[in-house]
Amino acid sequence: MYTKEQTAKLQGLTKDLQKNATDVDELRNILRFHEYRYYILNDPLLSDEEYDNLYKALEKLESENPNLITSDSPTQRVGNSLNKEFVTVPHLVPMLSLENSYNSQDLVDWDKRVRGFVNTEVIEYSAEPKFDGASISVIYENDHLVRGATRGDGVAGDDVTTNIRQIGSIPLSAKFSEYGIDKIEIRGEVLMTKNNFRKYNESLAEDGIAPLANPRNAAAGSLRMKDPAAVRKRKLEAILYHVSFIDINKKGSKNHALLNTHAGTLELLSNLGFKTPVHEKKVFSSIEKIIKFCNDFENKRDDLPYEIDGMVIKVNNVELQQQTGSTTHHPRWAIAYKFKARQATSQLLKVEFQVGRTGSVTPVAKIDPVHIGGVTVTSVSLFNADIIEEKDLRIGDTVIVERAGDVIPYIVKPLTDLRTGNENKIKFPDHCPVCNDPLIKPEGEAIWRCVNINCEAQVVERIIHFVSKDAMDIKSFGEANVRKFYSLGLLKNIPGIYTIDFDEIKKLEGFGQKSIDNLQTAIESSKQQTLNRLIFGLGIRYVGETTAKILGKTVEDIFELTKFSVDDLRQLKDIGDKVSESIYDFFQNEDNVAMLKDLAAKGINVRGNKKQEINGALSGQTFLFTGTMPTLKRNDAEKLAEDNGGKLLSSVSSNLNYLVAGESAGSKLEKAKKIKSIKIINEQDFLNMIQS
Ligand code: IVH
């Protein structure tokens, strides 16, 4: 929507307006631009506080000159424009956002304002984390999830029901009828845990795609994906925290009086199987206690599995909420208390280019050491050349560095106002900084690669990966030792680990008899590691621990894999096209096979744990499960099939005998219908096959 040039221009204008905002039209255009960056691209260029300040400046100008208000002003609606790729659906009740506060005085002021609206002295407040994800609304009708939507512009959002159904923590049905509830709309946040985010970014890096800055962008992006199966793999979570619409017509067997308070609402939702902040929230009758609770919570922020960016304080009693009411933008009965952004400024001293195991060249900024959230940051990955250009980073720039929880630090932006003119453009190399081969940027990728597999940097990184904890786990070998031994010529490749000259190592400083003994024992015992660890340790592109485990239990020994075609590999559970091709290429490469033979000759275990064929009711038959089964979980159904001698396939092909289709089965069912030999059955038919 905005070209590079426009973006640069608007960023410039933003700075001018931050100093002095007098032009209403310009202010609106700038706000619209930043809304677009935030809501549509999930790539904001301003902090929330900076945005709020501009927004308030517009509100002020408009209230001073009401004749200047236009119907399309950002202040005259609940948000922003929509992503066009999904069907737009109206929310039952507009999804308002929250007013922000940044310090205890803001909360004291808010408490006073609330007191002006209610007819009681005693107000209970509930405080809970402000989850930093993507907001959604879900509707249940007659106990079934019927719709899930993104926030969109607050009035209408994108219908992402299929994707929301992939989120394990959202029940597909819940017994609302027990409370007499016919229809309910619930608000919540879709999140990616810090751990899953890290793994997801690693997989992006493998694919040559720039990693995402934070879990919020990852969650929001996931909701907009076209392939629901891919969404499922992201392992999203959803936490629900607000009932926005409810239709109670009948009397239920359970009392819905819980809905009279926010705390009770969370309890009711939890009772029905939803994930809510019921345990994290606390209710107090004084704003001072709420402030203390929020400040204490800030210290626990890093211990949580997901990101939070503040707390949300809500009037607990729903009747009092109604008395307090809402503005067109936010409820008056709730407020967000934002934590301090974990940012600091530093100076970009130089950029180094690191070559990874797969040849990817990553620019890494060396910055003046700076403390952020208890950690000293000296190096910050810049991910790829496009990011350097987009942010217009220069050596010598003063930069804002952010470190959010476990998330790796990143550079938010340079402070261009502070430039002296002595800053230098960053030049991305066109040759590998280690082996000097020309770098290549594959079509559609953002990352430059060195494709010389004998490039020293790659060889060293491969050895480091091989000895690492999750691979062959050769304790006390470690990254530093690999680098040292390699640079001294004592170690040249992976098999070299097993013939390393300990007499030479003994001569090195810091290597006493005890450390030599430890190293020797660790190397020796690694020979007995399982085949899946060996396969993972080989560093085959796209082969993570899960795929390595699948391969390990598929073959009797590693050399069997040299006989697998791409198609054979594709038939294995959870192994897709890209991964199959990469595994195939690896095992067709003569040098790789020679290395494996060398390892086997040196006594490294290459035997797999192929399962003994089970003679059962399903022997000789292949199965694939799709959709949601009425009683069995997917994993349990698959285990049942295997325990009874059946074999699982991962995709629909003429090799498939049975497709077991559950509710909302999608493309696999359609494909299977076209292949006559495949029998399409349901869960009950499948269970009958085992029982008969
Ligand atoms: S309550 C009508 N509670 O923060 C009030 N919102 O910046 C509904 N958010 O739009 C919102 N955690 O998407 C509420 N515990 C929480 C929240 C929360 C995160 C989001 C929500 C809201 C945004 C405002």
Image (tube, grey):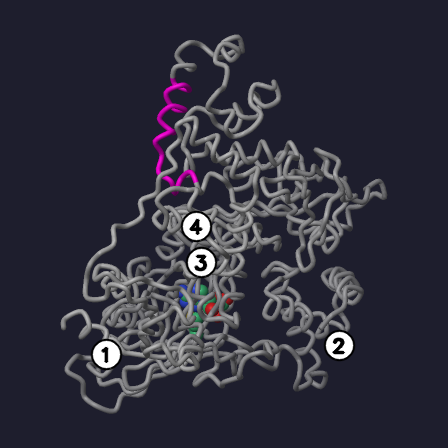
Q: Position of residue 529 (x, y in %)?
A: 36, 34
Give the distance between the C-alpha atoms of the residues marked 1 and 2, in whole angstroms: 50 Å
Secondary structure of the residue carrying tag 1 is: loop
Q: Which residues are magenta?
A: 518-534
Depth check: give the residue in front, 228 or 646: 646
Left or right: residue 690 versus residue 354 is left
Q: Position of residue 392 (x, y in %)?
A: 76, 52
Depth check: give the residue in front, 274 or 123: 274
- Say which amino acid is labelled 1: Lys
- Counting residues from the start of the chain, the first of labels 1 and 3 encountered is 1
Q: Is residue 145 above or below residue 267?
A: below
Q: Is residue 423 above or below residue 230?
A: above
- Counting residues from the start of the chain, the first of labels 4 and 2 encountered is 2
Q: Which of labels 4 and 3 is toward the front?
A: 3
- Counting residues from the start of the chain, the first of labels 4 and 3 encountered is 4
Give the distance between the C-alpha atoms of the residues marked 2 and 3, in whole angstroms: 62 Å
Asked if residue 61 is among those painted magenta in the image, a careful observer would answer no
- Measuring 52% from the left and 52% from the top, which residue is drawn there? 203
Residue 475 seen from this side: yes
Ligand 1 position by quadrant: bottom left
Q: Return the mark for residue 175.
A: 1
Q: Return the mark for residue 195.
A: 4
Depth check: give the residue in front, 639 or 511: 639
- Say which amino acid is labelled 2: Asp
- Measuring 71% from the left and 86% from the top, which residue is drawn there? 67
Q: Which of labels 2 and 3 is toward the front?
A: 3
Q: Mark 3 = which residue?
A: 568
- Counting residues from the start of the chain, the first of labels 2 and 3 encountered is 2
Asked if residue 520 is among those painted magenta in the image, a careful observer would answer yes
Q: Is residue 57 above or below residue 47?
A: below
Secondary structure of the residue carrying tag 3 is: helix
